[in-house]
Amino acid sequence: MRPVDLARPHGLSGQAVRNYEAAGILPAAERTASGYRHYTSTHAAALRTFLALIPAHGHAEARSVMTLLNTGSTDEALTVIDRSHAELLTDRQTLDTVEQALTELTHAPDERPTHRPTTIGALAHRLGLRPATLRRWESAGLLHPRRDSVTGYRTYSPSDVRDADIVHQLRRSGYLLTQIAPLLGELRDVASPASAGSAIADRRHRLHTRALAMLHASAEIGDYLHEQGRHTERS
């Protein structure tokens, strides 16, 4: 096959295929006597695998996996994939914990914050934390208290208090601040428990879609490894 023959079924250009080869995403092509590239079914399988890996694991990881597979470092490639699967599981568990925290807040009306701003001391006391902990969460971008125009003290709105509750719940479950930030960012702008539930459902759908993409990518990797084996036998 010519580069364009390999590219056309995927809506790519021949130059894109040549770029993928240069990057190590595709194995090196043989050359004809006149210098033209000669692609085979092995290259077609490699391209299908790379394109399937992108929505499953991200572009950088997809490129890493392919370059490792093409240099015979199969164990290292599988480690990259395993790490990505583990991250997906952590994302699912984190989402479950956030959903549980929101449910507890919704069903605990006596403990929900009033519309009056809360001071850092009051919030720290409520959560059983030190004020320094809340300031550290603020530095990490998890909390965004305002400053009183007169005193300059931090004041926490009801949504800030809700965020602090969620962060506290996740921290007690062993999650890192960097793991909490993406989910909290998606929930920060929701105006009600119903909209928060919708945001969670949307993220859960995206995780589900990614999990299915991972299954498809795994099947393509299996096919590619089989094709590599056949190519080795033919050689």
Image (cartoon, rainbow, N blue to C red):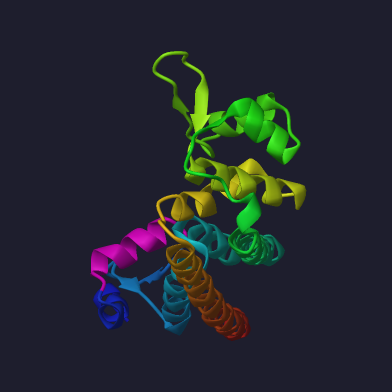
Residue 54 lies left or right of residue 132; in this view the side is left
Q: Given the current orientation, which residue lies at the most extreme top position?
A: 151
**What's the magenta bit mostly, secondary-structure-wise?**
helix
Residue 13: within the magenta?
yes
Examine the image and state in which quarter residue 231 appears: bottom right
Which residue is painted at 65% across and 59% down in the image?
108
Examine the image and state in which quarter residue 34 appears: bottom left
Which residue is painted at 49% across and 46% down in the image?
159
Which x, y percent locates residue 17? 32, 67
Q: Is residue 144 above or below residue 225?
A: above
Which residue is painted at 41% across and 69% down in the image?
29
Residue 110: within the magenta?
no
- Stretch of the chain drawn in magenta: 12-24
Examine the image and state in which quarter residue 123 appears: top right
Number of numbered tags placed on the structure image: 0
Tell which of 189 and 69 is nearer to you: 189
Tell which of 36 and 195 is nearer to you: 195
Tell which of 60 and 91 is nearer to you: 91
Tell which of 78 and 56 is nearer to you: 56
Which residue is painted at 68% across and 30% down in the image?
133
Which x, y percent locates residue 9? 29, 83
Q: Is residue 151 above or below residue 16?
A: above
Which x, y percent locates residue 169? 69, 51
Residue 27 seen in the current view:
no
Residue 148 lies left or right of residue 127; in this view the side is left
Residue 90 lies left or right of residue 207; in this view the side is right
